[in-house]
Amino acid sequence: MSLIWGFCNYQNDDDGMLIHKQMYDPIKDFPHSKHHFETQRNVGAGHMLVANTPEAVYENLPIYLKQEQVLFTAQGRIDNRVELAGKLGLKIDDRCTDGTLILQSYLKWKRDCVQYLKGDWSFAVFDYSDQALFIARDQMGYTSLYYYQDETGFYFSSSIKSILSLPSYKRRLNELHFVRHLTLWDDSIDKHGTYFQDIFSLPIAHMLSVKNRKVSQERYWHPKNISISYRKNKQDYADEMLHLFQSAVKARLRSHKPVASMLSGDWIAVLLAI
């Protein structure tokens, strides 16, 4: 999975490339094929490519679109590529990257684009016409996004190490979060927190906006809102479940390298017992 990061610099006299370096250095040893920085005015975005699909090798992010006035970066995998491309009027081929699909979805539907994206993904876009940063995460995936804000700026990254390396951040233990994990406390308490004070994580199915230095969050999807589908008989349920399962597995097997799997020791013990 690729990594992304970025910032809104509240001190315009600071060098954007210096901030990029501060956020990239702690993760530069992670395996990746290439990385790129982009800074426009006081906003920056970065991308570290780990190609996980055949199309990802053609990914070139972040990207600044001058006409649309947006700076965009993304990571992850889109599973409904054909369906989404049809709604966007795009030709789907081996060079149509998932980043392109996410970007075009944002340009067409703006923040409502999160309702059309299926897979494991997260992205960030700064809209210069609105002077606002928008960040979103998938509904049930394993991508991660952390963020931090102080008087120098707003910072985000899919690796918490990028934020811990910032000179303006002083490491402090988030005692509430630490105790909650030790005691299996209610997850609804401090659910956005991390082990580090003032560094927060963006939960699944959430989107975040930053405008005029004000941070706001919103949950855009919840399992309880899924409509119930009824079928005529039990076999119809079984057939549809098998179809959905096979489709989900097929989507996750898209790779430009051979795919492997492994079993944990517990599962091996179960199989041997059988």
Image (cartoon, helix red, strand yellow):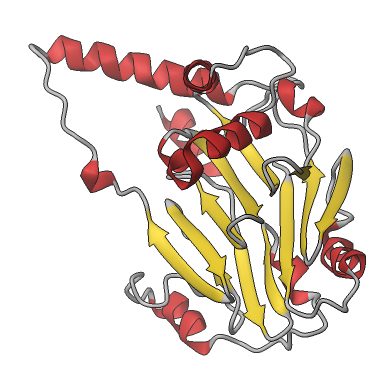
Comparing 270 with 74, the one in front is 74
- Residue 261 lies, with reference to residue 76, above or below; the image says above
**Where is residue 206 shown, x and y percent of the image?**
44, 56
Q: Residue furthest left?
A: 232
Vertical arrangement, residue 36 with respect to residue 96, above or below: below
Q: Position of residue 77 (x, y in %)?
A: 60, 33
Above/below status of 115 relative to 195: above
Q: Is residue 185 left or right of residue 230?
A: right
Residue at figure coordinates x 12%, y 16% from the top left: 231
Give the total number of marks visible in the rendering: 0
Query: At x 23% / y 15%, what residue is drawn?
Result: 238
Could you tell me which quadrant the C terminus lies in?
Answer: top left
Decide which of 81, 144 is in the foreground and name it.
81
Give the left or right position of residue 33, taking residue 130 as reference.
right
Q: Position of residue 16 (x, y in %)?
A: 87, 67
Q: For the point 88% across and 56% down, which residue is it?
A: 28
The one of 117 and 125 positioned closer to us in this rendering: 125
Residue 136 is at least partly visible in this image: yes
Residue under the point 84% across and 52% down: 38
Q: Name the one closer to the observer, 181 or 254.
A: 254
Quadrant location, the N terminus: top right
Report x, y in % for residue 10. Answer: 73, 78
For this view, does 66 lie left or right of residue 209? right
Residue 106, placed above or below residue 238? below
Q: In which quarter of the view is residue 145 placed?
A: bottom right
Can see residue 202?
A: no
